[in-house]
Image (spheres, helix red, strand yellow):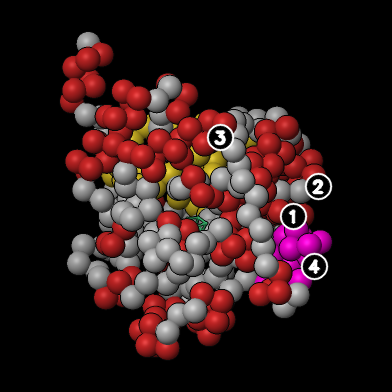
Amino acid sequence: MNVVKKKIDLRAWGGATKKEWADWRWQYQNRIRTLPKLAGLAGLPPDAVKRLNPVVGTYHFAVTPHYFSLINLADKNDPISRQCFPDFREVDDVIDGVPDPLQESEHMPVPGLVQRYADRCLALATNQCATYCRHCNRKRLWGKSAPARTKDDLRGMVDFVASSPGIREVIVSGGDPLTLDEDLLDWFLGAFRAIRHVEVLRIGSRIPVVMPMRITKTLCRMLRKHRPLWFNTQFNHVNEITPESARACEMILEAGIPVSNQSVLLKGVNDSYEAMRELVCGLQCISVRPYYLFQCDPVAGTDHFRCDLLKGMEIIEKLWRNASGLCLPRYVIDAPGRGGKIPLQPFSLSANRE
Ligand code: SF4
C-alpha cells in the first residue's frame, strides 16, 4: 500500500506555518468548533447550517484541522466528513437508539469506572475528544450537561481498583485519554501500575487517526514506562491511513506497545467488502492488527450509521475467503450489561471449520 501525503493549503488555516501544522497544540487549539467556521471551510449553504443548529446544541462538535484535511469536499459521500460533520439525523432520527444501550452507567461502582467483567474494568478518564465522532457510542458523555472528570474522580477509580483484587486489566478510555494533561495521564497510569494485582493496562484512543501529531517522543517515553500496555485505536476507512497516522502508530510500536484496531461498521463509510478489505489490508501494511469490527450499537443519534447484521456477515464472509488471517478482525456485537461481546460469524464459515 502506498500511503500518499496530501497537499495542505495552509492559507485556509490563517496562513499557519508547516511547523504549526505539525504541532498538536496548534491542531487542538485550531479545531473547527462552530458551524460558521465549518460552513466557511466546507462551503455549506446557509439553510444547511440552520438545520444543524439543534445538532450542535445537543452534541459537541469539533474537528481537528488534520482530520478535516483528509476530506474530499467535492465528494458528498466522503467517508471522513460522514464521521465528523454534524448531521441533522442525529436529533431527528431517534427511532431505535437509547443514550446508553450497553448500560454502562448501571455498572459504575464509582463515577467514571465501568465494570462489566470480573477481571477487567474501563476507566473513563475524560469526556474530551480531539474530534467528536458522530457515531460514538458514548455520545451521552459529551452532552453539554455531562460533568467533566475531576482528579478526585480519577483517584476514586484507582481506589476502587486497588480494593478489587479480581481486576487484572484496566482499560483507560474516555472520551480520549490522550487529550488529558500528560503529567496527569502519567500519574493515572502509574497509580494503576502500582497496584499489585493489575497485570495489564490498555489505552483506547483515536488520536493516531484524528491528531497523530500528539504522538510525540515524550509521550511515547511516558507510555513506555507503564508496560505491559496495549494500545487500541479506531481507523474506520483507508483514507484515514496517512503518513502522519502511520508514523504515529510506528512510534507507539517502537515504544514496545502493540497497536490494534477496533473499527465500527458504519453505513456510508465502510459498509462494503471493498472498503473493508482496503482498510484491513492498509492496517496490516502499517503493522496495526485489525482486532474487532463492531456492529454499531443502538445509541441515540446514530441510527443513520447502523447497518443490517446480514450486511456485516456478508462482508466478513468475503473477507475470510479473500484476505490473509492477519487482516481479519472479529465481527462482534456488544450486548448490554454483563452480556459482553458476541461474535458474529456466518454459518457457512462455522460449517467449513468443523
Ligand atoms: S474519539 Fe472515541 S470517545 Fe471520542 S468521539 Fe470518537 S469514538 Fe467517541
Measure how far apart labels 3 and 2 are at the Cα level.
29 Å
CB atoms at circles 1 and 2 under 8 Å apart? yes
Residue holding disc 2: 218
- Judged from the image, the secondary structure of the residue bearing numbered disc 1 is helix
Up the image or down, 234 lies above or below 342; here it is: below
Measure how far apart labels 1 and 2 are at the Cα level.
9 Å
Q: What crowding class fits label 4: few (fewer than 14 Cα within 10 Å), some (14-19), or many (20 or more)?
A: few
Residue 228: x and y in percent read 65, 30
Q: Mark 3 or 2 closer to N-term?
A: 3
Residue holding disc 4: 17
Q: What crowding class fits label 1: few (fewer than 14 Cα within 10 Å), some (14-19), or many (20 or more)?
A: some
Measure how far apart labels 4 and 1 are at the Cα level.
25 Å
Of circles 4 and 2, which is in front? 4
Residue holding disc 3: 1
Q: What crowding class fits label 3: few (fewer than 14 Cα within 10 Å), some (14-19), or many (20 or more)?
A: few
Residue holding disc 1: 182
CB atoms at circles 1 and 3 under 8 Å apart? no
| Residue numbers of the magenta segment | 16-30
Of circles 3 and 4, which is in front? 3
Residue ID at (22%, 15%): 352
Q: Is residue 354 magenta?
A: no
Q: Is mark 1 within 8 Å of ligand 1?
A: no
